Amino acid sequence: MTANNFSFVCKFDGITNEVHQDLSYPTRVAMDSYREMMVEKYQDQAISGTIDFIDTRLYKYCSDPCLPYGATYSHAGVDFIGSGNYSACSTSLRPLLHKETCPAEEETCSLSGKYQPTLAGVDDFFGFSEFYYTSQDCLKMAGKWDLDKFELAAAEYCSTNWSLLEENWKNKLYDADYNRLKHQCFKSAWVPVCIT
C-alpha cells in the first residue's frame, strides 16, 4: 500500500525549518473507505426514494464523481459510472480525513487530528510516493508543485471521456498501469485534500 508522504521547507523570519510528514493513511485504504461511503449513500437514497441514477438506456448506474467520465465499476452490489466531476470528488473525500477530530483552534490539522503546518509561504514542497505518481503518471506534472495548475489538469483528466483515456493509454500517452488510469481522478482529488 502506498502512503502519502511529503516534505517541505518553510522560511519564517530568516529561519529555515524542514517538515517531513507521513500521513500513514494509504491511498488504497482511503479509496476503499470512499467506496463504502458511496455504497451507504446510495443504499440510504434507495430507501428514501431519492437515488441519483444515470440511465444509459441499457442499465442504471449510480454516479461517482471520483471516476473518469463514463468509466464503470461495481462495489458491494452497487454499479457505478463516472461523472468525472473533480470538484464534487474533492468535496466528497473531505469526510474521510476526520477533520472533526481537530481542535477548534487548530488552523492546520490534516488526518485524524494530526498537526500539519500550513503550506502558505512554503518555498519548496516535495511529494513522494503517491504524490509523485499522481502528478506524473497521467498528468505529466512532476517537479515544482503548483496546486492551481495541478487541479486544472486533474479536472480536465477527470472530465475526459473514459473511452478516450483508454485509447490514449493504449497509445502509451500515460506512464500508468490500467488501475492508475481508472483511479487517477480519485487520487488527483485525494492529494490536495490531504495537504490543504
Image (cartoon, rainbow, N blue to C red):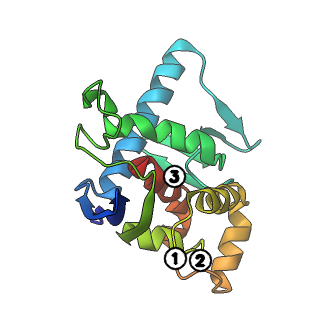
Q: In x, y percent, where is residue 102?
A: 26, 31
Residue 121 falls in image quadrant:
bottom left
Name the residue rendered at 69%, 37% in the picture: 54
Q: Are marks 3 and 2 in contact (CB under 8 Å)?
A: no
68 up-or-down from 90: above or below: below
SS category of the residue bearing label 2: loop
SS category of the residue bearing label 3: helix
What residue sits right under mark 1 in the picture? 142
Q: Are marks 3 and 1 in contact (CB under 8 Å)?
A: no
What residue sits right under mark 3 in the picture? 189
Residue 151 visible within the image: yes
Q: Are marks 2 and 1 in contact (CB under 8 Å)?
A: yes
Q: State the residue lying farthest toward the right.
A: 57
Crowding near the residue tagged with mark 3, few <14, some 14–19, many ≥20 C-alpha atoms within 10 Å: many
Q: Nearer the viewer, mark 2 or mark 1?
A: 1
134 up-or-down from 33: above or below: below
Q: Which label was assigned to residue 26?
A: none
Q: CA distance from mark 3 to mark 1?
A: 16 Å
Q: In x, y percent, where is residue 157?
A: 66, 62
Name the residue rendered at 59%, 24% in the picture: 51
What residue sits right under mark 2 in the picture? 140
* 97 or 77: nearer the viewer: 97
Q: State the residue lying farthest toward the bottom.
A: 172
Q: CA distance from mark 2 to mark 1?
A: 6 Å
Q: CA distance from mark 3 to mark 2?
A: 16 Å
Indicate the amino acid at tag 1: Ala
Q: State the residue lying farthest toward the top.
A: 48
Q: Point out the tag, 3 or 1, that comes first from the N-terminus.
A: 1
Q: In x, y percent, where is residue 134?
A: 48, 68
Q: The N terminus is located in which quarter? A: bottom left
Residue 89 falls in image quadrant:
top right
